Image (tube, rainbow, N blue to C red):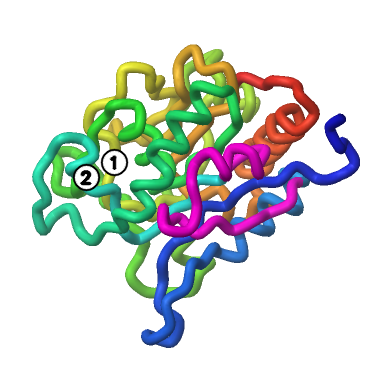
Amino acid sequence: MTNTSRRPVVGIIGNMSMLNDTYPVHAGGTMNSEAVAQVAGCLPVIIPADPRFVCVNELLSMCDGFLLTGGRPNVHPNEYGEEETPAHGSFERARDAVTLPLIRACVERGQPFLGICRGFQEVNVALGGTLHPEIRDLPGRMNHRMPPDGSLEEKFALRHPVRFTPGGVFARLMGAEEVMTNTLHGQGINRAGPRIVIDGQAPDGTPEAIFVRDAPGFTLSVQWHPEWNACGDPVSRPLFEAFGRAARDWATGLRHAA
């Protein structure tokens, strides 16, 4: 019998980092845990995204949903059939080895995930899409990277609108066809995977909101960072609330497609 008294467990994909420049850690931003616990109403558990320590089947059985977090390293271009160049930046191959098959398994099973920034890009790559290494170098595109200086409030400030497909999944969820978001990314979708639906774009045409066509579960993913001020932001809150409902449905044996 399913234990319905516990909070659904959300695995937060951790990133490799160096504490004090010397001690290796798998870390997850506090704001991710806050959004999962306080808005989604789930139990946050940081996952060491390294196949030496975890396997996809174990994660699927332990967690009711997954938060695919942002991170400074990028998905390796070999994962979408391209050669590495200096423009692609740094990589974290161990995370690629965990998240890409995890995403494909979640899509097949209907197990919910929410993709953020790098996680958004991982979803596209996992489903057969490609990435631009540096979108600010493309004609007509704005610089989507975070400001190099300033406080966290300044780095995560709302900087551009995102327009959703009228009547689409995101427009219905947000109750609006246009919202303001932050932007802290250098890469972006080049070619969308065959099942990836681009449901929201920045004014320069950069894809900002996607989901997986005909997936049996929740697959919403965004290029911005909704974990910042998730409790108070009118765009972030409904996104995490919907993700929390999907995780609760999974935990109780129901299914919730997005």
Counting labels gives: 2
Q: Kindly identify the residue that appears in the image at 21 percent across and 35 percent down.
A: 80
In front of the other: 176 or 189: 189
Q: CA distance from mark 1 to mark 2?
A: 6 Å
- Residue receiving disc 1: 188
Tag 1, which secondary structure?
Answer: strand
Query: CB atoms at circles 1 and 2 under 8 Å apart?
Result: yes
Q: Quadrant of residue 160?
A: top left
Circle 2 crowding by C-alpha within 10 Å: few under 14, some 14–19, many from 20: many
Q: Kindly identify the residue that appears in the image at 56 percent across and 45 percent down.
A: 67
Under mark 1, the amino acid is Gly
- Horizontal side of residue 246 vs 216, given as left or right: right
Q: Kindly identify the residue that appears in the image at 84 percent across and 32 percent down.
A: 2
| 115 shown above or below 124 | below
Q: Quadrant of the N terminus?
A: top right
Q: Quadrant of the C terminus?
A: top right
In front of the other: 108 or 29: 108
Q: Mark 1 or 2 closer to N-term?
A: 2
Tag 2, which secondary structure?
Answer: helix
- Horizontal side of residue 61 vs 14, given as left or right: right
Observer able to see residue 157 = no
Q: Quadrant of residue 155?
A: bottom left
**The stretch drawn in magenta includes residue 179:** no
**The stretch drawn in magenta includes residue 54:** yes
| 49 shown above or below 138 | below
Residue 53 at what x, y percent from top left? 48, 58
Magenta stretch in the rendered image: 42-66
Residue 220 at what x, y percent from top left? 53, 31
- Horizontal side of residue 15 vs 76, given as left or right: right
Under mark 2, the amino acid is Ile
- Residue receiving disc 2: 135
Residue 11 at what x, y percent from top left? 60, 49
